[in-house]
């Protein structure tokens, strides 16, 4: 069975702090994809990143970075120098098969205070 | 820009009513999905469709049905709404099959059943 766990339900930081959102997954598949989505107050999920199971290179995009470690089945997301606009609910997800069905974690609500 | 449009942002329905949630996408995607979002549970897959008139059950199909008569439109139907179906409903679409691309989401419909 597939499972994604985001142990942090809510995180509150002050602007300019760095923050890491944790994601741990379970799967028996050897080929799989991991995703992060952002859900701002408007409600629409915004795609942030896709990573396949064969690529463990860390990725950086501006203030965002992702650390994928197969050994610990983790795909953590770090925001550097957080801003108020980063306040949102963030979801980690695992693609289960070729049908692109996603298994989502419970989400982490990030609040960045000025 | 891919656009996934859900017909209503907010709906209030009475217990026992038949409810239709409509979703339209404009990118000719084969795959379409209906998810339900509840606090702490993340998004859970209700149904998905990988082609016109094709449908597959997701993790929580009970109490729901779907219809896909045209490629761009995927409807979620609550045959007899109940209070435990009060939730946020999100529609998504994606490219087909072996391509693990990201899913694009609509803004969500917040349904309240009273």
Image (cartoon, coloured by chain):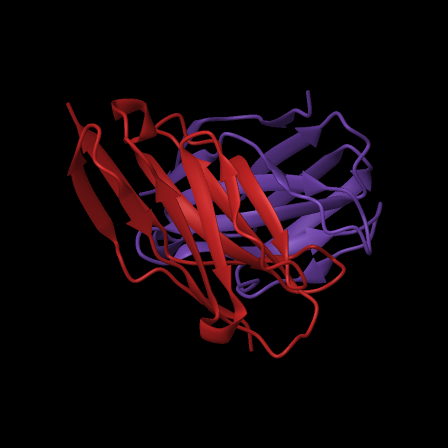
Q: Is residue A63 left or right of residue A69?
A: left
Q: Nearer the viewer, residue A51 or B93?
A: A51
What residue do we see at 61% from left, 52% from top?
A: A51
Q: Is residue B30 left or right of residue B14?
A: right
- Above or below — where is B62 with respect to A27? above
Q: Is residue B38 left or right of residue B45?
A: left
Q: Nearer the viewer, residue A113 or B78?
A: A113
Q: Quadrant of the C terminus of chain B?
A: top left
User: From this viewpoint, which residue is outermost toward the top?
Assistant: B1
Shown colour of chain B = purple
x then y, percent, for residue B14: 38, 41
Q: Nearer the viewer, residue A64 or A107?
A: A64
Q: Which chain is red?
A: A
- Above or below — where is A16 with respect to A25? above
Q: Is residue B93 left or right of residue B27?
A: left
What residue do we see at 40% from left, 48% from top?
A: A77
What residue do we see at 15% from left, 23% from top?
A: A114
- Above or below — where is B66 with respect to A70? above
x then y, percent, for residue A98: 76, 60
């Amino acid at each position: 069975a597939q499972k994604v766990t985001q142990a942090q339900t809510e995180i509150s930081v002050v602007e300019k702090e760095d923050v890491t959102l944790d994601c741990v997954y379970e799967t028996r598949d050897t080929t799989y994809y991991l995703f992060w989505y952002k859900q701002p107050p408007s409600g629409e999920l915004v795609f942030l990143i896709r990573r396949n199971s064969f690529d463990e290179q860390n990725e950086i995009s501006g203030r965002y970075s992702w650390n994928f470690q197969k050994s610990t089945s983790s795909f953590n997301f770090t925001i550097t120098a957080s801003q108020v606009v980063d306040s949102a609910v963030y979801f980690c997800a695992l693609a289960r098969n070729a049908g692109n069905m996603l298994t989502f974690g419970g989400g982490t609500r990030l609040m960045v205070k000025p | 820009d891919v656009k996934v449009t859900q017909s209503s942002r907010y709906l209030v329905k009475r217990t026992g009513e038949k409810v239709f949630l409509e979703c339209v996408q404009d990118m000719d995607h084969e795959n379409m999905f209906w998810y339900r979002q509840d606090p702490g549970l993340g998004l859970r897959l209700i149904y998905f469709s990988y082609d016109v008139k094709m449908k597959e059950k997701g993790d929580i199909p009970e109490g729901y049905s779907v219809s896909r008569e045209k490629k761009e439109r995927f409807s979620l139907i609550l045959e007899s709404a109940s209070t435990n179906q009060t939730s946020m409903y999100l529609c998504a679409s994606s490219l087909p099959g072996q391509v693990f691309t990201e899913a694009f989401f609509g803004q969500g419909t917040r349904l309240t059943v009273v």
